Image (cartoon, rainbow, N blue to C red):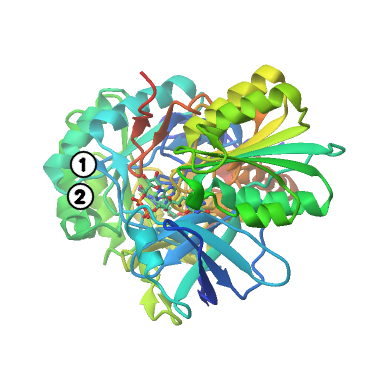
Amino acid sequence: MDKPLALPIQKIITESERVKTYVFDYDFPGEPGQFVMCWIPGFDEKPFGIIKKEGKGFRISVAAVGDSTKAMHMMEEGDLLGFRGPYGSVFVLPEKGKQIAMVAGGYGMVPLSYLAQEARKKEYKVHLFIGARNKQELLFKEWMEEIGVLVHASTDDGSEGYKGFNTDLFKSNAEKESYDKVYTVGPEIMELKIAQICWEKNIPFEVSLERYMKCGFGICGQCSVDPTGWRMCVEGPVIDGEKLKKIEEFGKYHRTASGKVEKYPWVK
Amino acid sequence: MANLSVSLAGISLQNPTILASGIMGVSASSLKFVEEHGAGAVTMKSIGPTDRTGHKNPTVYSWGEGITNAVGLSNPGAEEGAAHLEEMKKILHIPVIASCFADTVDNIAKVAEKLLEKEPLALELNLSCPNTEDDFGCMFAMDPRVTERAVTLVKKTSGKTKIFVKLSPDASNIVTVAKAAEAAGADGITAINTLSGLIIDIHTKRPILKNTFGGLSGPAIRPVGVRAVYNLYEAVKIPIIGTGGINTGEDAIEYIMAGATAVGIGSGVYYRGIDVFGKVTEEMENFMDQNGYKSLEEMRGIAHKC
Ligand SMILES: Cc1cc2nc3c(=O)[nH]c(=O)nc-3n(C[C@H](O)[C@H](O)[C@H](O)COP(=O)(O)OP(=O)(O)OC[C@H]3O[C@@H](n4cnc5c(N)ncnc54)[C@H](O)[C@@H]3O)c2cc1C
Ligand SMILES: Cc1cc2nc3c(=O)[nH]c(=O)nc-3n(C[C@H](O)[C@H](O)[C@H](O)COP(=O)(O)O)c2cc1C
Ligand code: FES
């Protein structure tokens, strides 16, 4: 459905200081990697990854960063949010692969947790490299451990696991383990580092490449990337490592809501 | 095999499908992607005087029979817009139609001048966007005199570039406005832009679009577009790009029979995917072959003869 469907929030779970999970009793379709456009009545409409756990219903997890996500964090159970979708491409598990790795930063854990759950159901061995500022921000760590995911945590302050970046932890790990496929979602600088490691080592991988979204269904052109013109709401957000080579703007720049090109701070 | 090529105000198109402004037109590579899917020409998203982020979301959604949008003319401004146009011209093989809007007649002439420096084959003056703030709220295309002034000013610097004027079905008399544009030297008319509308979500008791009102497009507006083209064909001599609700080859042929020279496709990208251009072209060809038409010329305006 492409018109917002208003659904009452059934349950709100506080995951950490910055993240809340919203549970809905509605069997919304969607596969790992896909997203919904979520209407926050009176504020805005934003893309969020979806998670479906056992049984009916679906959930989204939202980090409070700006005005509209902060407004969402003020909402209560029973309040209405509007949903349309699901949109975008999906993660593909390797055919006969036995061992996969996931590298997640921040709310990148949202789509990856859903993928990890599906992979575990199919008995893949899953290594998860999850990075956060501190121990409290390690999203879904317990859930992942419960379903048998091998969690390699890293924190900026060393309050849990490796002190430093999960990209470094992944790199050293990839020297001794062999992965049939790698999945990464998080800040673009993190995704870029993982992509470089995977390209170098010839490991198949997929990234979720986020771009500013307006329509979410492929007509406004806001989320098109250079030079292929692929729309990250239709041909993306999940992009295969080989295809990613063609997206020259990856890791370099993106477009703001006006369509202006904005370079990333790490690019000289 | 039917011949689908057309000459639009002297510009040759391999097929009559033109990507409408505001759809996929944010960047050169986005338009290249449309070219790869079979469009005969593309229109860039309308450029205004300065950088605008547009309205907040929700800005676009579909209500089934149509699409409602209030993107709010987001664009990077004339300077960067002109740079985008240059890049578009460089990497596309099909004609690129530039597009511009502004709050005042003087400003639209200024934006037009900036884009005209890049010598596009054609420039479309968007005088008819229904979903901007108060300062843009009074559409130029409501008033024949304002339209005439805008066209006259732009024509002063347009050189070889053809000037198309995009009109609104919300004008009380679209024909009068079109005639004024023609009298001022416009080379073509694009009809129609979206119609102003409002959709309320009854559960949250609110308009869905952040901007409250939005422009309607898609199949629901096709009869309005066909009607406009039919009336315009009898009133002006300059070519018309029939736009509004075209999803299939049959829809396009309906517009050609009403008098359109070429057809604009926007929402069709949503309804049938990015390859809508190739699909429409193929369906037109099939219809023409089955019904013994060899060229678009033979069908153009044919509905007026009955
Ligand atoms: C495919 C996709 C999936 C996402 N999944 C999640 C998720 O599961 N959980 C989560 O917390 N966040 C997710 N996000 C990010 C989320 O949409 C934005 O971070 C959020 O909208 C911030 O909005 P704000 O109004 O609070 O802050 P703002 O201050 O408005 O925005 C902060 C930053 O968020 C980004 N952003 C804002 N609006 C949009 C938009 N319409 N489209 C894309 N990026 C935007 C921009 O980079 C902006 O600078 C996802 C984004 C995309 C594109
Ligand atoms: C999301 C969206 C954005 C649009 N933006 C513009 C624009 O910037 N300039 C313009 O002249 N028309 C704009 N339009 C109007 C279209 O060009 C077209 O006239 C209208 O949508 C009717 O055609 P359709 O039914 O094929 O979509 C926009 C339409 C949509 C749906
Ligand atoms: S968000 Fe509109 S095309 Fe992707």
Q: Secondary structure at mark 1?
A: helix
* 3D distance between C-alphas at marks 2 and 1: 6 Å
Please state which amino acid type lies under the numbered disc 2.
Answer: Thr
| Residue at the (40%, 72%) spot, across then down | A75
**Mark 1, chain letter?**
B
**Labelled disc at residue B297:** none
Q: Nearer the viewer, residue A53 or B169?
A: A53
Q: Seen from this angle, which residue lies furthest right?
A: A96
- The answer to whether the beta carbon of the residue marked 1 is less than 8 Å from any atom of ligand 2 is no
Horizontal and vertical percent position of residue A90:
67, 47
Disc 2 target residue: B147
Q: Residue furthest front?
A: A159
Whether the residue under disc 2 has CB within 8 Å of ligand 2: no
> In the rendered structure, the residue with mark 2 lies on which chain?
B
| Callout 2–callout 1 Cβ contact below 8 Å | yes
For the N terminus of chain B, give its image quadrant. top right
Q: Answer yes or no: is residue B303 visible.
A: yes
Which quarter of the figure has residue A97? top right
Name the side, left or right, on which B121 lies relative to A167. Answer: left
Please give left or right for residue A96 compared with residue B129 in the image.
right
